[in-house]
Image: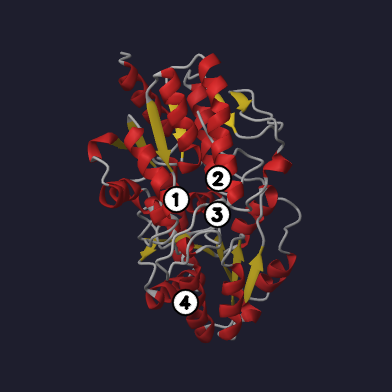
Amino acid sequence: MLGWELPPHHSGGLGVACYEMCKHLADSGVDIDFVLPYTTEHRTSFMNIIPADNQTIDDFKWSGGVYDLKSFPSQDSDCTVDMPLDLTKQHDLYAHNIVKIAKCGEFDIIHAHDWLTFKAAIVAKRISGKPLIVHIHSTQFDQSAGKKGNPAVGEIEIVGLKMADRIFAVSQYTKDVLVREYAVPKQKIKVVHNSVNMQIDIPRNKNLYEYLSIMKSNGYKVVVSVGRMTIQKGLTHLIKAAYRVISIDSKVLFLLAGGGEQKEELIRLTASLGISRNVIFEDWVKGDALKDTFKIGDVFVLPSVSEPFGLTALESLNYGTPVIISKQSGVSEVLDNCFKVDYWDIDLLSEMILGVVNHSSLAKEMLKNSRRECENQSWYKTARNMKNNYEEMLGVT
């Protein structure tokens, strides 16, 4: 298996998804060699982690977020540029170093996650002759919100998709994108939903957001959104909806957690609308701080323009916060008992937010029913789905 990140060294949901699916694949009897492009300590007993290069994680932190669009062509321009030098270098280095691993390793299938690993995966397939699965968590179409995006990355995606013997898509939504935008035969694609491990969280004595806790005790409500601040995530629409919400109920606060190239633009937009007192921007949060972020909310909003899955919505439900999700998301396929809205419908989104924060009985019922749906999802089912595909490709009965 070829990946780009694993917890605790991850910048988004990709590393978390890889970790969980591998853990449950291992539980089902699959032996995994997980190859990363750097070396670092991972306390993981259920799979063998192999560094493709001796560079450390500190050396590797060269790009900020590889899914940020700040290094991509302007979305309003026809000009094209190559990937940044550092990204090209790391991408090619991974492919170069995979040669020895592919020659020496004993494996039956190559399973590669997203375009970042595609060059290395194609090299491994050529050397070993083993079947290749590419796992699509996000595409250039998604990351550029349905626009052109980075043509160099798009070309890598197309080659990887063509060379793959089978493709895993994290949702039917993503499968449809691959068929429509990348001309991939639909019979080549299998839908493998992400999941979350539902658990009862033990409350901590101290919450990161003491200020928000005090405000809530004074009758304020908190709307939370967690994710990379890029055009893909639709946060400009959420802020415009926030303006309408606050104009009706000034005791609603918005907490936006994450980082990304659009953050400064979002702060300026908030200021221009005169709602800065009600909108709080938080940097990347992980671990217990991430739990606090979900738990402090009265409602979680996923406003993405194009979201292959949307694991944060399930995480929010796990920590006891009901959700409003974009119809343009894969997670909308597994949740029915929540509010769904087209990302561009600011009026309806603001009405939904006000409805949830001001009607506790509605919020509780949504949460209860959504959590029940989550319990029907599991990484165990996801792993079983993937293992069945492995066995089918290998002719195992």
Where residue 194 appears, x then y in whole percent? 44, 41
Q: Comparing marks 2 and 3, which lies closer to the viewer?
A: 2
Q: Judge from the rendering whether residue 142 lies leftward or rightward of residue 39; answer left or right.
A: left
Residue highlighted by disc 2: 88
Q: Nearer the viewer, residue 333 or 102?
A: 102
Residue highlighted by disc 1: 152
The Cα atoms of the two marked residues, 2 and 4, are separated by 39 Å
Is label 2 in contact with label 1 (beta carbons under 8 Å)?
yes
The picture quadrant where one finds residue 71 is bottom right
Q: Judge from the rendering whether residue 28 lies leftward or rightward of residue 265; answer left or right.
A: left
Upstream in sequence: badge 3 or badge 1:
1
Is the image coloured rainbow, by chain, by secondary structure, or in one colour? secondary structure
Q: Comparing marks 3 and 1, which lies closer to the viewer?
A: 1
The Cα atoms of the two marked residues, 3 and 4, are separated by 23 Å
Q: Nearer the viewer, residue 282 or 108?
A: 108
For mark 1, does the 10 Å Cα neighbourhood hold few (<14), some (14 to 19), or many (20 or more) residues? Answer: some
Where residue 337 appears, x then y in whole percent? 37, 56
For mark 4, does the 10 Å Cα neighbourhood hold few (<14), some (14 to 19), or many (20 or more) residues? Answer: many
Amino acid at circle 1: Ala
Residue highlighted by disc 4: 241
Task: Describe the element under mark 1 as helix, strand or loop.
Answer: helix
Residue highlighted by disc 3: 320
Residue at 46%, 33% in the rendered image: 112
Q: Does 227 sit above or below residue 175? A: below
Amino acid at circle 3: Gly
Upstream in sequence: badge 1 or badge 4:
1
Upstream in sequence: badge 2 or badge 4:
2
Amino acid at circle 2: Thr
Residue at 54%, 47% in the rendered image: 13
Amino acid at circle 4: Ala
